[in-house]
Amino acid sequence: MSKVLIIGAGGVGRVVVHKCAQANEIFTEIILASRTQSKCDAIAAEIKSCTVRTARVDADNVAELTALLRQEKPQLVINVALPYQDLTIMDACLAAGVDYLDTANYEPLETAKFEYSWQWAYHERFREQGLMALLGSGFDPGVTNVYTALAAKKYLDVVEEIDIIDANAGSHGHPFATNFNPEINIREVTATCRHWENGQWVETAPLSTRRSFDFPAGIGPMNIYRLYHEEMESIVKHIPTIKKAQFWMTFSDNYLKHLEVLQNVGMTRIDEIEYQGRKIVPLQFLKAVLPDPGSLGPLTTGKTCIGVLARGLKNGQPKQVYIYNICDHEACYAETNSQAISFTTGVPAVVGGIMMLSGKWRGAGVFNMEEFDPELFLEVLDPMGLPTQVVEGQWPTL
Ligand code: NDP
């Protein structure tokens, strides 16, 4: 019997609500809270198998959220609001004595800076209260951490290199749109690239390194671009044999052309400017005029392929293993009214919640996904709609 409080009624929140409702033998009571209650009500109305209650909350306001948590007394908070709210939600969880889970690491509003230091600093406070916080339980971060842990547990004795490769081979028909929150997406893509090599971070210009990767499941070769992505930080900490870690994402020429123009004209700036007597942040204004990612569901066709190519040693011999998932946008929409980007994030969030509530993954403090048994997680993830493929072979160095 577990009551869950989900924060954030966006694309990912919708999937989390649908999937918690499907697993309502575990999530016996579901509450969806967000800044705009009408969005919560619209999602709750889609659920026929059980009742989803809704609430309005400003998760930037610790006192307001703490009061809601004390009133509702959930066992778990699933935070699928924005990365800016991570710390205030963790504070409220500590104040009310509730376990915490999220899918993206904290990011200060005024700088596009992705690192775990702020959230890792909560470890002692969660540990002292016997509470658990599970960080980054989406797909990447999330399942990619679990795939790396699986490579280390089952396929390689020593993991030496990882390439995390995220392909969206889908199409939504808009000239330019982002698959998840445009502000977060554009901050991530335009940030300085960092990858891990021989014990240190190496910085390169955003989107300056391009390769081609031949994806499975009929997707074929696509251009991939190296980016910084937060899971590399925790993975190289917890699996210290890794000498090189890189993250790659596909972008169409069309997406990059639009992004370049938007950057050149200043529309991706995250500092305030004066406009007609008031202060606005250009990137937040851009978000307001771009298609809402939540509206892309009925339009998006094609597949995603997200996985980890791990290289290392097995019985003293070099070995490579590619662990990935294929997800179909239209099938996700048919099931949850959301496209595959929201689906691949929301489903692992729910599985992370199941791991915590069932005690299969348990600890007091703040944890990343690769610190727990990957096979227990994947056993639940597969039947929830995200099956894992494992191929051993040879791939060119990226
Ligand atoms: P959306 O922008 O669609 O939804 C965010 C929701 O959070 C909105 O409902 C918004 O409310 C709500 N919200 C924002 N600020 C507050 C606040 N102060 N108090 C309460 N609610 C608030 O985002 P997505 O659903 O696309 O993404 C959700 C999260 O998932 C993000 O953190 C994103 O980074 C993460 N993500 C993780 C991935 C992974 O693989 N790990 C991949 C993709 C996303 P309102 O409707 O009023 O604006």
Image (cartoon, rainbow, N blue to C red):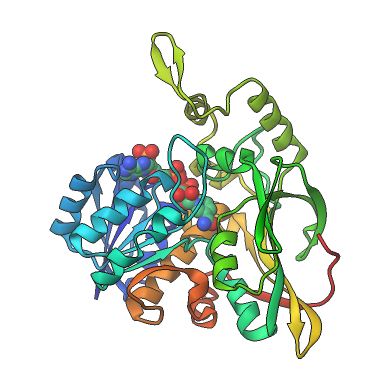
Check the image and report above or below for 288 versus 13. Answer: above
Left or right: 398 as drawn, with respect to 383: right
The foreground one among 28 and 205 is 205
Expressed as whole percent of the image width and height from the top left, the position of residue 360 reads 40, 82
- Res 10 seen here: no
Q: Quadrant of the N terminus?
A: bottom left
- Res 172 seen here: yes
Which residue occupies 41% across, 60% down?
120
Which residue occupies 75% across, 65% down?
217
Expressed as whole percent of the image width and height from the top left, the position of residue 330 reads 60, 55
Residue 79, picture quadrant: bottom left
Expressed as whole percent of the image width and height from the top left, the position of residue 260 reads 70, 29
Residue 132, picture quadrant: bottom left
Check the image and report above or below for 268 versus 73. Answer: above
Farthest-out residue, top: 276
Expressed as whole percent of the image width and height from the top left, the position of residue 92 reads 24, 54
Farthest-out residue, bottom: 315
